[in-house]
């Protein structure tokens, strides 16, 4: 049980970090360039090229760092940790950003302003994106790493972690809303 949660957390770290990197480094030109669809913004001001690039880059770098740290940490914890193939290292953060962008697209279509809270969607959009892109781009790695138990652990653990980090980001003034 604990081993599953630790392995799931480790495997998802490259998908968790991009959101936080985007908050830290976001800004500059928006992805939609101000374009609208049916009178509403395509994605909104909260999706920028810089934030997206920073998210993907940070997640990929983290995956490579985790691969180097894994042997030592495995020794201490006495459990095995997943390694990231090059494709997985890129797919997880890219998928996380894509899922977040897709969610913004849907939020704008349903008339929600930037920053509007959508419980469930806000916490799982990037998980769905990361798992989907990783399973498509690195299917063998995905099948090895994400068993049903691991996916179940991810779905339970992620919303709690996401809410927690966003509240912290809000309290220290990095985010405009605590979600
Ligand atoms: N961000 C970014 N580029 C991204 C994702 C996030 O620049 N691809 C930055 C933006 O500054 C954004 C902040 O991170 O405001 C928080 O991200 P998020 O909560 O996803 O955006 P919101 O501002 O809440 O906008 P939305 O309603 O579209 O989710
Ligand atoms: Mg938001």
Image (tube, helix red, strand yellow):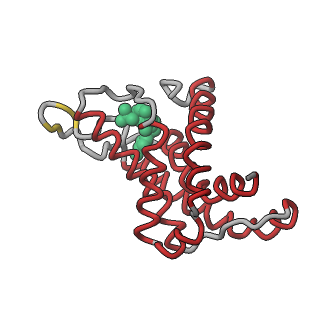
Identify the residue at the far right of this view. Answer: 76
Instruction: Tell me how many marks there are.
Output: 0
Q: Is residue 60 left or right of residue 135?
A: right
Q: Is residue 35 left or right of residue 122?
A: left
Viewer-side residue, 41 vs 139:
139
Residue at image point 45% right, 35% down? 120
In the rendered image, residue 79, in percent from the top left (x then y), is placed at: 80, 64
Residue 53 in the image: x percent, y percent? 44, 54
Name the residue at 15% across, 38% down: 37
- 57 vs 24: above or below: below
Q: Could you tell whether 143 is left or right of 83 in the image? A: left
Query: Is 100 or 136 nearer to us in this picture?
Result: 136
Figure quadrant, ligand 1: top left
Q: Please give the name of the residue rendered at 48% of the width and 50% of the height, measured from the top-left corner.
A: 127
Asked whether, in this view, residue 74 is left or right of residue 152, the answer is right
Depth check, front residue: 149 or 30: 149
Q: Position of residue 14 (x, y in %)?
A: 57, 57
Which quadrant of the figure has residue 173? Answer: top right
Residue 72 location, quadrant = bottom right
- Residue 155: horizontal and vertical position, in percent? 55, 46
């Amino acid at each position: 049980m604990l081993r599953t949660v630790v392995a799931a957390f480790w495997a998802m770290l490259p998908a968790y970090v991009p959101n936080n990197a985007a908050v830290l480094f976001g800004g500059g030109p928006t992805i939609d360039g101000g374009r609208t669809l049916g009178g509403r913004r395509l994605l909104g001001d909260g999706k920028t090229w810089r934030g997206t690039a920073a998210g993907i880059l940070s997640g990929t770098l983290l995956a490579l760092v985790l691969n180097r740290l894994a042997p030592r940490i495995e020794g201490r914890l006495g459990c095995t940790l997943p390694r990231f193939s090059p494709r997985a290292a890129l797919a997880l953060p890219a998928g996380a950003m894509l899922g977040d962008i897709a969610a913004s697209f849907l939020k704008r279509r349903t008339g929600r302003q930037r920053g509007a809270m959508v419980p469930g969607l806000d916490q799982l959009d990037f998980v769905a994106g990361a798992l989907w892109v990783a399973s498509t781009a690195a299917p063998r790695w995905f099948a090895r790493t994400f068993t049903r138990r691991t996916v179940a652990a991810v779905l339970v653990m992620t919303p709690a972690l996401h809410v927690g980090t966003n509240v912290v980001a809000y309290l220290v003034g990095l985010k405009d809303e605590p979600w």
